[in-house]
Image (spheres, rainbow, N blue to C red):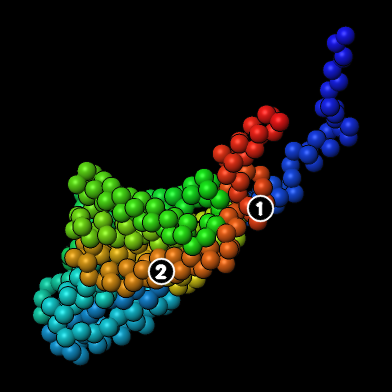
Amino acid sequence: MTQPTHSNDAGPSGGFLAEIKDAVTTRAALLVLGVLALQLAFITSYIGAFHHPRPSEIPIAVAAPAARVAEESAQQLGALPGKPLDPRAVADEATARAQVRNRDVDGALIVDPAGRADRLLVASGAGASLSQAVEEVVGTVWQGRGRPLVVTDVAPVAKGDARGLSSFYLVVGWCVGGYLCAAILAISAGARPANAARAVVRLGALLVYAVTAGLFGAVIAGPVLGALPGSLMALWGLGALVVFAVGAITLAFQGLAGVVGIGLAILLVVVFGNPSAGGAYPYPLLPPFWSTIGPALPPGAGTYAARSIAYFKGNGAGGPMGVLAVWAVLGSAVTLLCAVSRRGRAGAAVGSGLPDDAPSVPRLAATGDAEGTDAR
């Protein structure tokens, strides 16, 4: 006779609360709380950085036919309440213009007592909001003096670069590609590489992606959309460096903290990096905290370098690219050190449901074991 088949599936024994406990693990609940904290940090950082932009010690050169006139004008601008400007007297107009184009200053005032008007040189390529702030502050002072002021933009933005924001958006796109590429490697093969050889493979794959993404981003922003002028090759190199640096940082955080490392990378690059990057509001318009950390983080370094390449013939790009190189080397080194310390224990893949310290199980091996068990 056919024996009745008894199901081993137990029905809900503890009610709805038990179902919740079974469906939502402690680890999942902690990760959700981490996401909530990241979201609140995102809101706080962006609103905190952008809600009240105010000029602070914007560097500006002052030139005049007589050194005494230049010094007096610089002193008058430097004594303004709140110190919106950081004026410095220079020898002549040629020096002042060169300092603007070299990104040593963000504007230049050319005083001509014998003429009918004075001139103000600005550079909207460094950020439209920054040039507008310089024009507003100096214009207010000169209006009080009853002296006409003629404004000249010596580094105007391209027609396709509204308010000079294309550099910022391009760098943000490169940053997103960097940490998403590193995150995908974690999803597919474990958050932590099993050994140094696999870490090298991941860094190599990231490098190939960075070179490709850097090229496509530069081509889209330059020849395709006409948003950014300047050297295509220089923008390509910058893009590759930005993508690789951010990806290496993400791999390093994953090596240190497993899956949580992806959130740490987002915290550094998105929550802290983007608001302080000087995109909508360059550094002299940001609160002190954001203007201080911005140049040291990849989005800020990338944005400054991109604007230098696009509008200032690369002047001032060396320092920011050095910052990106440091992040790239540091991220790669930490990734390799973490892999060596793992001694063959690969981290669980993201989404596997296993703890970070659980070793990854090769899919074919697991399938083979299952087939062998069925055969037995």
Query: Is label 2 in contact with label 1 (beta carbons under 8 Å)?
Result: no
Query: In this orientation, does residue 286 appear?
Result: no
**Among the two numbered marks 2 and 1 on one chain, the one whose residue lies closer to the N terminus:** 2
Identity of the residue drawn at 60% across and 60% down: 257
Count of numbered circles in the view:
2
- Residue 11 lies, with reference to residue 135, above or below; the image says above
Q: Is residue 46 left or right of residue 239?
A: right
The residue at the far top in this view is 1
Identity of the residue drawn at 67% across and 47% down: 354
Instruction: Report x, y in % for residue 295.
Output: 40, 69
Where disc 2 sits, the SS reads helix
Q: Between marks 2 and 1, how big is the CA–CA gap?
A: 28 Å
Q: Is residue 27 left or right of residue 268?
A: right
Q: Which residue is mark 1?
A: 358
* Disc number lying in front (2 or 1): 1
Determine which quarter of the picture holds residue 342: bottom right
The residue at the far front in this view is 376
Categorize mark 1 by other alpha carbons within 10 Å: few (<14), some (14-19), many (20+): some
Instruction: Report x, y in % for residue 109.
Output: 22, 75
- Residue 107 lies, with reference to residue 165, above or below; the image says below
Instruction: Report x, y in % for residue 315.
Output: 22, 70
Identity of the residue drawn at 40% across and 62% down: 245
Query: In this orientation, does residue 180 appear?
Result: yes
Q: Nearer the viewer, residue 94 or 178?
A: 178
